[in-house]
Image: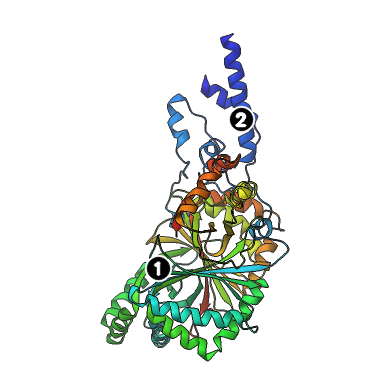
Amino acid sequence: MASRVLQRVATGLHWRRAGLQANVPAAITTRGFSGLKSLFVRKVDPRKDAHSHLLSKKEDNNLYKIQFHNVKPECLDAYNELCEEVLPSIHADPEYPCELVGTWNTWYGEQDQAVHLWRYRGGYPALTEVMNKLRQNKGFMNYRDERGKMLLSRRNQLLLEFSFWNEPVPRPGPNIYELRSYQLRPGTMIEWGNYWARAIEIRQQNQEAVGGFFSQIGSLYQVHHLWAYKDLQTRDKIRNAAWHREGWDEVVYYTVPLIQHMESRIMIPMKTSPLK
Amino acid sequence: MLMFFFALLFASFISFLCRRFSESSDKGWFRSLFVHKVDARKDAHSNLLSKKETSNLYKIQFHNVKPECLDEYNNLEAEVQRRLHQDQDFPCEVVGSWNIWYGEQDQAVHLWRYRGGYPALTDCLQKLRVNKEYLEFRKERAKMLISRQNQLLLEFSFWNEPLPRKGPNLYELRTYNLKPGTMLEWGNRWARAIKHRQENNEAVGGFFSQIGDLYVVHHLWAYESLQSREETRNSAWQKEGWDVNVYYTGKTSPATIML
């Protein structure tokens, strides 16, 4: 009897089906009493394919690596100098199929932290090739030894780009960058992607959108959005202006429940960063 | 009689569902019954929750100091803060500077105010970058630190602004990591309850984060002693409305309490 009531209620109520992609989960399915248990568990995307096929750019095969290095506060300057020598040389060397997308120091958030973003055009094969070559490179091995003495800890993740974001390309400065990192509830990545696919152009009005990524290796169900602004005041203005655009309040309302934890870092690009 | 009772129950249940539905996502109105409700809002938190009449921006710094360097660190910081605070050229003020007594020890917490918001912050930063003495200080300080983090905060509109006060006091910083989407609800509840906690001047300042860890709230309290803290907090329960406030906000997750 309960299921009949639920069915009547469900069809009687009007809700928007806002033109979502075909692989998005269908609206509420009514279940019998035996399905009552599932009411108490968070609904998760039923999907037929991996996130990497559903969400990332089809036309190219870019893999991204993000590194977070917690540097000993007294070694920060020395660390930056060391990186300034080594990182651009790997970037420029055609032997290594990788590019430095950006390199920053954090300004607000976790301090004395360096963030590096790399692109491997060619995906996993390119990544493996670079790794094998670097292992043979004496200069690089020395750099790693030196660097090791200056670090408290480090972690990294392999990421893919969302298909609906623009690719990060070099830009002239001076800018400040904001990296907003979201830890999503497992199972909600597709939903996140769908809402942002519709909303991204609201946040591309002032070229503030640099890149949007989701993690594949490392902490999972993590999303990073990278933004560039002239300064903090401009950032405030641009972000506030988004609220006057139609659809923005909806995106916030529907995507916020998907988040377990979020953080924001303001970062200053290093001299040698292609994203200045 | 029984049928009537059940019909009534069902009717109220259905109307409850309908009300919840109208507040929830179209994708899962069932699901929304069991997930915490998120604020539907039309504007940024900074416009909805902070003081309109001023544009004060606050920076809180947490410095984890090497235990053996704590005294030296304190002397160094005190000297630098005194100068920066008094120098008219730098549009910033030290609101307070503390060492942790109970909680994460050997940690220093500094709270700065920038009257004039982000432009004042940027002004300060640019001037400090070219100040030789300050850069020296930073180098010296870096040797004494294990790690540091900071956040930029705004004040809640309904809290009093933190003003200098005579001591000796001890301070409690209660830090809450809210569930994303619940900041407005938090603000609304506390706006009504704050007066219960201002009777002994214990309320110093209430802030929410804008940059750094997000959905973080800090409440800063001052007491004469641990004993008077206990008494003041207990007496809040005697006031009407305090239990309601705790009930509704307790569902968000209170995190570290530092003293």
Give how far across and how far down residue A32 sits, in percent: 47, 25
Give how far across and how far down residue A165 sits, in percent: 56, 64
Residue B252 at least partly seen: no
Residue drawn 62% across the image and 83% down it: B87
SS class of the residue under badge 2? helix
Is A131 above or below relative to A189?
Answer: below
Tell me the distance, in whole angstroms, between the alpha carbons under discs 2 and 1: 51 Å
Which residue is label 1 attached to?
A123
Residues A87 and B256: in front is B256
Residues B192 and A197: in front is B192
Report the amino acid beneath label 2: Phe
| Extreme-bottom residue of the structure | B132
Which residue is label 2 attached to?
B16
| Extreme-top residue of the structure | B1
Q: Are marks 2 and 1 on the same chain?
A: no
Q: How is the image coloured?
A: rainbow
Give how far across and how far down residue B10 sits, in percent: 59, 21
Give me the chain letter of mark 1.
A
Residue drawn 55% across the image and 80% down it: B82
Give how far across and how far down residue A79 sits, in percent: 39, 83
Residue drawn 61% across the image and 70% down it: A208
> Alpha-carbon neighbours of circle 1 within 10 Å: few (<14), some, or many (≥20)?
some
Residue drawn 71% across the image and 58% down it: A245
Residues A18 and A114: in front is A114
Residue B196 at least partly seen: yes
Residue depth check, mark 2 versus mark 1: number of the one nearer the observer: 2
Is B193 above or below relative to A122?
Answer: above
Give me the chain letter of mark 2.
B
SS class of the residue under badge 1? helix
